[in-house]
Amino acid sequence: MSERRRPVDRPRRAALDVLTAVRADRAYANLVLPQVLRKHGLDGRDAALATELASGAIRMQGLYDPVIDACLAKPKLQPEVRDVLRLGVHQLLSMRVPDHAAISTSVDLVHQTVGRGPSGLVNAVLRKISARPVDQWVTDVAPDPSTDLHGHLAVARSHPRWVVDALAEALGPDASDDELAALLDADNAPPRVTLAARPGLAEVSELEAAGGTRTSRSPYGVELAGGDPASIPAVAEGRAGVQDEGSQLVALAMSDADLEGRDEQWLDLCAGPGGKAALLAAIAAQRGAHLVANERQPHRAALVASAMRAVPRGTVDVLAGDGTRPPWVPGTFDRVLVDAPCSGLGALRRRAESRWRRTPDDVDVLVGLQQVLLDVAIDSVRPGGVVVYATCSPVLAETTEVVAAVLDRRGDADEVDRFQLWPHRDGTDAMFAATLRRRPL
């Protein structure tokens, strides 16, 4: 008589599909998740459960993997089995799922997706893990904080050690150990959805009526308590968009910087996927200015064009071109934004898998590109015009050091303003922006 299997737990199976795509296909969880939810027909509570399972398991694998390994005689596992165990550990250590439910559903999941063989191992490992609370496991598997604080935080807060070191350096020598821990905790807290009402196209009050609350710093920002932003008419029509408040403040740094003389030609040098460009285009339309939104990758340029669908015709031109070799004449623009490609370590709460993919070598490569793009941006602006250099990274090599290197080499521009936002202080992504002015002739 054949063995009778229990029905597939759809939220857990969906979460496993996300982990598989992130691991095997190098997908981004936030991009693949909506597709997986649709595939499994999940919404409401089931969709929320699948989202938390997948996101949490990815975020916290820097802690969960040592815990799993401590319960194995031989730490080597099939990647598919480790994915199932990560989901089980997240339920046991970080969610209010009863132990028996977390264990039994994980055993069923590995049986259905990998086979019967690993079922006993999954059962045994999760039972061992369920016997201790998370704080005890941290004590057992993380370095002693009294002798290796960064090593301890790397495990306890699930960040690569080099990222902890880089973030500590970015916070500065006066930051306390508690503040570093608070920043890492903020990286592990899922952010709420923030919208930008594009001026002249949507009112903030329209987004408030859809259940939002005004943000504290951007005049266009509204934070949603929940729900699908695509169901809001202004978002569906392109009159508003999903955009972190920090991203909005970067765009405003460019549009609102003091400027003397002509203010007609604006450039977003690295415009994809289009959130900042769409906000700038709406502001430009109100001021009678024109925006060029340039993006090197054609598929991302298409996303920029889609974000502009509600902007008045003639306000913006979207180009698919290499920003390091621009087609326009130097000195063409009055305002330039260069939101440079970066490590993305300022948005780890949105793209948790980035922390496991990036390396210090990646930063070294990016810094060279960032300097080239900032050079192009300064060349592209007229004397007296302004350039905003921005990254979604607080790493000093990508922020202040890029600006200093370019300004020291050129001698024809000055830094006039700067800000660094932080998730634990400001409730935004860790956006950096420096405003530069090209010296008049």
Image (cartoon, rainbow, N blue to C red):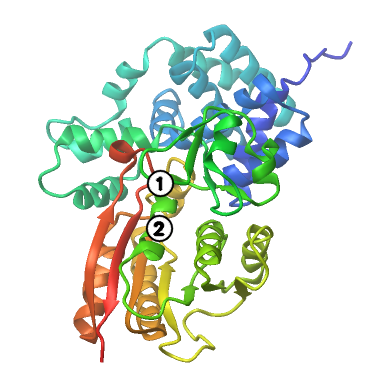
Q: Quadrant of residue 19?
A: top right
Where residue 184 appears, as percent x and y from the top left, is 31, 37
Labels 2 and 1 touching (C-beta < 8 A): yes
Looking at the figure, which quarter contains the N terminus?
top right
In the image, 165 versus 298, the foreground residue is 298
What residue did someone put label 1 on?
A: 218
In the image, 246 versus 25, the foreground residue is 246
Find the distance from the CA under tag 2 to the CA under tag 1: 8 Å
Please indicate whether residue 420 sits to the left or right of residue 327 in the image.
Answer: left
Question: Judging from the image, what secondary structure is the residue with disc 2 in?
Answer: helix
Residue 75's place in the image compared with 328, above or below, is above
Where residue 242 appears, as percent x and y from the top left, is 56, 45
Local crowd at mark 2 within 10 Å, few (<14), some, or many (≥20)?
some
Where residue 114 appears, as percent x and y from the top left, is 70, 31
First of labels 2, 1 by sequence position: 1
Q: State whether residue 113 appears in this view.
A: yes
Residue at 26% of width from left, 71% of height from top?
403
Q: Given the image, on which type of amino acid does mark 1 rest?
A: Ser
Q: Residue furthest left?
A: 174
Residue at 30% of width from left, 16% of height from top?
136
In the image, 420 versus 100, the foreground residue is 420
Local crowd at mark 1 within 10 Å, few (<14), some, or many (≥20)?
some
Residue at 38% of width from left, 12% of height from top?
132
Q: Quadrant of residue 68?
A: top left
Q: Given the image, on which type of amino acid does mark 2 rest?
A: Leu
Q: Which mark is residue 340?
A: none
Question: Judging from the image, what secondary structure is the residue with disc 1 in?
Answer: loop
Please indicate whether residue 110 sits to the left or right of residue 329 in the image.
Answer: right
**Label tally:** 2
What residue did someone put label 2 on?
A: 252
Please indicate whether residue 419 sits to the left or right of residue 334 in the image.
Answer: left
Q: State whether residue 362 appears in this view.
A: no
